[in-house]
Image (tube, helix red, strand yellow):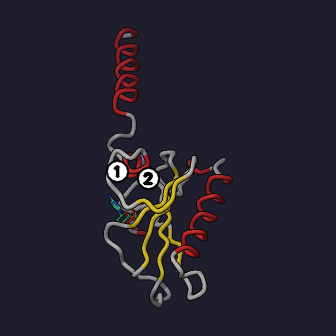
């Protein structure tokens, strides 16, 4: 009945306001509510060291905004996506891997190995990268 619907809607709104994306570790890092080795931040994004580095240089660039991944939801986010890439290049330069070579990776969904469902760009370098990646 209609009261049920209204109650459910109110409950959902309250939950969202109360908890936001607090379950998302990368949202919490961006909000400085969870620890990370921050390398860079601006109004749109944050860069920090990956907790389990797979290369001598391995950092992540994330938008502050919670976007689950490089799926359909990124329509209209062209400026933000371009900015993330520009910050990735800046990080590679600052880490001294721009000339030797570096790789930017966005794993999307399970078969690609995505484990954290907040869009993130891996920036990796400091060793020779194989191709194709496994
Ligand atoms: P993916 O598998 O592409 O979703 O990548 C997730 C990455 O996030 C992995 O490389 C993890 O090591 C990294 N990661 C997960 N939790 C944290 C954290 N709290 N701080 C830094 N990196 C993290
Ligand atoms: Zn998030």
Q: Mark 2 touching mark 1, by CB under 8 A?
A: yes
Image point (46%, 66%), residue name: 107
**In which quadrant is the C terminus drawn?**
bottom left
Secondary element type, mark 1: helix
In the image, residue 53 above or below residue 129? above
Disc on the earlier residue, 2 or 1: 1
Counting from the top left corner in percent of width and height, residue 110 is at 38, 63
**In which quadrant is the N terminus drawn?**
top left
Image point (46%, 62%), residue name: 39
117 vs 51, nearest the viewer: 51
Asked if disc 2 is less than 8 Å from ligand 2, the answer is yes
- Label annotation for residue 25: 1
Query: Nearer the viewer's eye, disc 2 or disc 1?
Result: 1
Counting from the top left corner in percent of width and height, residue 11 is at 34, 21
In the image, residue 16 above or below residue 69? above
Q: Is residue 74 shown left or right of residue 39?
A: right
In the image, residue 79 above or below residue 109? above
Q: Tell me where residue 14 sits by quadrant.
A: top left
In the image, residue 123 above or below residue 82? below
Image point (34%, 44%), residue name: 33
On the image, numbered disc 2 is attached to which residue? 118
Mark 2 to mark 1 CA distance (whole Å): 8 Å
Asked if disc 1 is less than 8 Å from ligand 1, the answer is yes
Estimate how packed mark 2 is, as few (under 14), some (14 to 19) or many (20 or more) residues with alpha carbons within 10 Å.
many
Counting from the top left corner in percent of width and height, residue 59 is at 44, 68
């Amino acid at each position: 009945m209609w009261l049920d619907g209204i109650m459910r809607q109110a409950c959902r709104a309250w939950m969202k306001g109360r908890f936001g994306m607090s379950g998302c570790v990368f949202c919490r890092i961006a909000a400085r509510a969870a620890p990370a080795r921050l390398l860079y931040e601006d109004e749109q994004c944050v860069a920090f060291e990956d907790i389990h580095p797979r290369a001598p240089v391995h950092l992540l660039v994330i938008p502050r905004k919670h976007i689950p991944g490089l799926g359909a939801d990124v329509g209209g986010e062209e400026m933000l996506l371009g900015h993330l890439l520009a910050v990735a290049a800046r990080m590679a330069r600052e880490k001294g891997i721009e000339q030797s070579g570096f790789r930017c990776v966005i794993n999307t969904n399970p078969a690609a190995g995505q484990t954290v469902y907040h869009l993130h760009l891996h920036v990796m370098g400091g060793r020779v990268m194989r191709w194709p990646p496994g």
